[in-house]
Image (tube, rainbow, N blue to C red):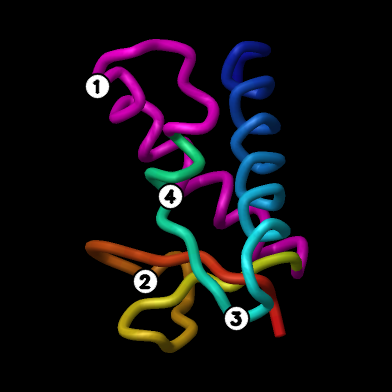
Amino acid sequence: MTDTEGQTGRRLERAILDLLERRGPTSTICPSDAARAVYEGDDDGWRALMEPARRAARRLVTAGEVEITQSGRPVEPTKARGPIRIRRAH
């Protein structure tokens, strides 16, 4: 991981945790919420941060901070395909 990727990854992790902190204890966010929070432009450039946001969420799962869910149920991060949601770990 390059320094820029590392900095962006840390910013995405912080954005995920900050967004969840502002919501209710059982609320979820989409990785796009974190990507939009970190992206510094006015266009659709945040879309390039979607996979880095998903990776940041997986790191936070490993750290025990969050869960990745699909259809409201926790899923193994490496097995999640398609749309995911992120919530605080229970």
Dominant secondary structure of the magenta stretch? Answer: helix
Looking at the picture, does residue 73 appear above or below residue 16? below
Residue kind at label 4, given as amino acid type:
Pro
Q: Check if mark 2's residue and mark 4's residue have beta carbons within 8 Å.
A: no
The earlier-in-sequence mark between 2 and 3 is 3
- Frontmost of labels 4 and 3 is 3
Report the Cα–Cα distance between label 4 and label 3: 16 Å
For label 4, the SS is: helix
Q: Which residue is mark 4?
A: 31
Say what amino acid the circle numbered 3 marks: Thr
Which residue position holds label 1?
Answer: 44
When the figure is inspected, residue 57 is found, relative to residue 43, above or below; the finding is: below
Which quarter of the rendering shows the N terminus?
top right
Q: Nearer the viewer, residue 56 or 31?
A: 31
Q: Real-space Cα distance between discs 2 and 3?
A: 22 Å
Q: Amino acid at mark 2?
A: Lys
**Residue 40 highlighted magenta (yes or no):** yes
Q: CA distance from mark 2 to mark 4?
A: 16 Å
Q: Would you identify the image quadrant in which residue 60 lies?
A: bottom right
Range of residues picked out in magenta? 36-64
Structural distance between the alpha carbons of marks 2 and 1: 27 Å
Image disc number at residue 1 = none
Q: Which residue is mark 3?
A: 26
Query: Dot 2 corresponds to which residue?
Result: 79
Q: Residues within 10 Å of mark 2 (few under 14, many from 20)?
A: few
- In the rendered structure, which disc, 1 or 4, sits on the residue that comes first in sequence? 4
Q: Amino acid at mark 1?
A: Asp
Q: Is residue 15 above or below residue 90?
A: above
Label total for image: 4
Dot 3: what SS? loop
- In the rendered structure, which disc, 1 or 3, sits on the residue that comes first in sequence? 3
Query: Residue at 51% across / 65% down in the picture?
Result: 86
